[in-house]
Amino acid sequence: MMKKLRTVNLEYAMVQGFYWAGFCGIVSYAAVYLQDRGYSNTQLGRILAFGYILGFLLPQLLAGWIDRSEKITVYRCQWVLLALQVGLVLTLGRLGGKSPVVSLLSCVLIGTEITLNPMNTEISADLELRLGHINYGAARGTGSIAFAPVSMLLGRLLESFGMRVLPAVFLFFIGLQAMALLILCYSIRGTQQDPAAQVRKSSASTFLQFFRENGRFFGLLPGIALLFFSHNLVNNYLINVVRNVGGDTSDMGLLSGYTAVMEIPMMFLYDRLLRRISCPATVRLASSMFVLKALALALAPSMTALFAANALQMVSFAMITPAMVEYVNRTIDHKDSAKGQALAFGMVTLGNVLSSAVGGHLYDALPVRIVLLAGGVSAFAGAALCHGFTRETRNTYDPQPEKVQ
């Protein structure tokens, strides 16, 4: 069993790796791709906002079905989403310039890619109930390992060959995601969740019951949204931030790849960190680091300073990502795990929606530094909520979830 668990951990890491490589092209380079087609920052912001809204709503819908149904599984949902993405990319590749159809298809492509993120997280919860502890941090760190070289390579490719390479890149990584998912599904064939988990799943709560049982969790969620509003006010418009200090698309690719590299140590070491400090403490610490990073980016006068500021990615984004997965696992009953993970990652998406909806207008109307300082204010508010609503569980790592009301 231990050998199989190690194998499944590696296969799950491969799923995460190929997902984040694809995410790099589809979402992180969306601004570059759409600006090349003639979209303004404001128009780009609307497309990203609607894409993120879809990426927020669709996981909530799918999570309710997954929690209640034995036939609708997280794996089947992923197959449908990947097949839909292939059709969207092929269609976009045949369309040129900007048009309502291009805008709509781009929204759906971004929305489906974002939806895959909480689906991947729910896979880790399912595997844990089947086989034992899944090292989510290491798997997500593999995603950062994949993201970094892809980002650097894409920046160079776009400078040399233009935007025509992106659809082929999209299809390549969608295919790799499907291959990794197929290998994982084959590996767990015949395994079952433990009987107690199946009983809990059959008694999944309604949303109102879930809200009543997890009041503190719902207080924490707006804090996560505000942190990621600040985070994505930079990420969604990174090309603007880079150009503001004299950089270009190639510099953006290097910065994005470097930032992903900064995530890797924390992602892999998070499980060990939990042996020394509590999970809620890591949420609070990471939220504070979001504030410092936002201020450092706002005050950065050069590309070198941007690289230095993004070193804080290690103790902000890289820490809170596995921390929230673990926090949900410890505070939400297994019967509602899909809802919990979908809501947690839904707040990440909501932050993206807000930053996309107003970010384009802000960057068109205000100096870049003022926009980044506004992101710092948002990060401070989010950190305050995280400090106020997280609650201590245990001071050492325990993979078994704890129910906290």
Image (cartoon, helix red, strand yellow):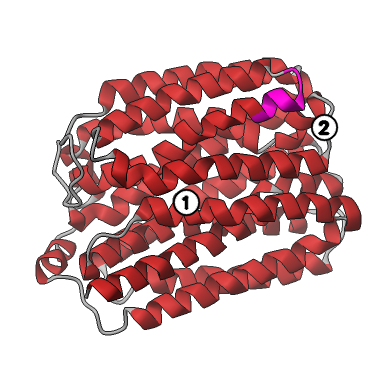
Q: Which residue is mark 1?
A: 141
The foreground one among 142 and 38 is: 142
Q: Secondary structure at mark 1?
A: helix
Residue at 56% x, 53% y: name it: 145
The foreground one among 233 and 22 is: 22
Please tell me in which quadrant of the rendered image residue 70 appears: bottom left
Q: Which mark is residue 247?
A: 2
Please tell me in which quadrant of the rendered image residue 170 appears: bottom right
Taking 362 as reference, is 224 left or right? left
In terms of sequence position, does the residue under pointer 2 or pointer 1 come before the other? 1
Q: Locate residue 1, reporting x and y percent.
A: 21, 75
The foreground one among 151 and 174 is: 151
In magenta, the rendered stretch is: 301-307
Taking 198 as reference, is 41 left or right? right
Residue at 55% x, 18% y: name it: 376
| 196 falls in the magenta region | no
Q: Locate residue 73, reporting x and y percent.
A: 34, 71
Q: Is residue 93 visible?
A: yes
Residue at 74% x, 34% y: name it: 42
Looking at the figure, which quarter contains the C terminus?
top left
Q: Amino acid at mark 1?
A: Gly
How many numbered discs, if any?
A: 2
Mark 2 neighbour density, 10 Å: few (under 14) some (14–19) many (20 or more)? some
Taking 387 as reference, is 97 left or right? right
Residue at 49% x, 35% y: name it: 314
